[in-house]
Amino acid sequence: MSIKEKHKPSIPHEPYLKPPLHNNFEISEGYIYSQNERKIHGQYFHKAVDYSTSWGQPVYASASGYAVASYHRYTIQNSDKTLKLFKNKPLGNGLGLFVQIYHPEKICGVKNGRITQYGHLSKIANEMKLKTTKTEKVDIVKRIIEKNNRLRNNKKSRKEIEKIIEFHKKLMKKYPWINYKYGYNFSENIEEKESYLYTLKECETLFKQKNKYVTWINQGDLIGYTGTSGLIWGELKYCEEKVKNIKPFKTWDEVHLHFEEAVRDEKTFFKKEQRDPYGIYKSVKHYENVESLKDTLFF
């Protein structure tokens, strides 16, 4: 069974999107990460597409819907919970500064609606209000110890663990940002939880109440500008507590827009049924000449 056969959701296929970038871009990652990307962060599935471009390019809504703006970032760890390093420096990942748009059934043609996400932005369009919540502290040392204690095979000795912990404490002191993650408030209280976790019904209600964090966006409206937010490498070059207009900085990845189409499970809050907007479901080398494709979500 191919990845497309296994992962393409069995839902109505109705083109409803327009490209989020208008010019000066190329697809740099497909539904499956390229080998070069996997070597850095170790992940196989992307379940989205990346558009490589220059810093500050305008990003537009692919379809109409209720839009929210948020910030999401975590520190990449290995399976043993030690920090994953690239050229001896820790890595940050996540959507960074991003916009999520909820598309009702009347827009996307799918029951219960769909969402699109636009990640790693450098700035949010003025029409939207960014909602950020309290950071969550990550106890890296505790995670390493607990993970090692649960191992049946290849468990490290006490001396080995102490050496690892000593090394990580130095990293934690040098790079304080690795001790925190953003965008993980899963509270049932609508006032406290992340705006990207709102359900479609909540968005509709909040919009009617003129809530400042939910905005109706029309297809083609400006929603932000491209960047590399969330993709931290080594020193943190911007303030995560006041993410507004991020200036260009050197990181482990190129400037690009993360574009994803999916639905969110209202019970678990996890995204699911991600569709490849081009219908390819492979790595980036298969995304040449996408303009000639017919079985896409674009029209």
Image (cartoon, rainbow, N blue to C red):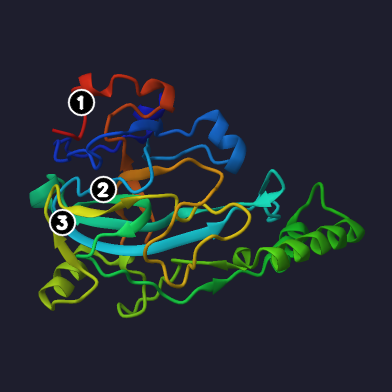
Instruction: Tell me, for residue 65, which label it has, or none.
Output: 3
- Marks 2/3: CA–CA distance: 15 Å
Rendered residue at 58%/43% (across/down): 41
Q: Secondary structure at mark 1?
A: loop
Q: Which of the two marks, 2 or 1, is nearer to us in this view?
A: 2
Three-letter code, disc 3: Gly
| Residue ranking furthest to the right | 159
The earlier-in-sequence mark between 2 and 3 is 2
Image quarter (top left, top right, bottom left or bottom right) of the C terminus: top left
Instruction: Tell me, for residue 295, which label it has, or none.
Output: 1
Q: Which of the two marks, 3 or 1, is nearer to us in this view?
A: 3
Image quarter (top left, top right, bottom left or bottom right) of the N terminus: top left
- Marks 2/1: CA–CA distance: 24 Å
Q: Pointers 2 and 3 in contact (CB under 8 A)?
A: no
In the image, 117 versus 236, the foreground residue is: 236
Judge whether 111 appears above or below 281 on screen. below
Three-letter code, disc 2: Val
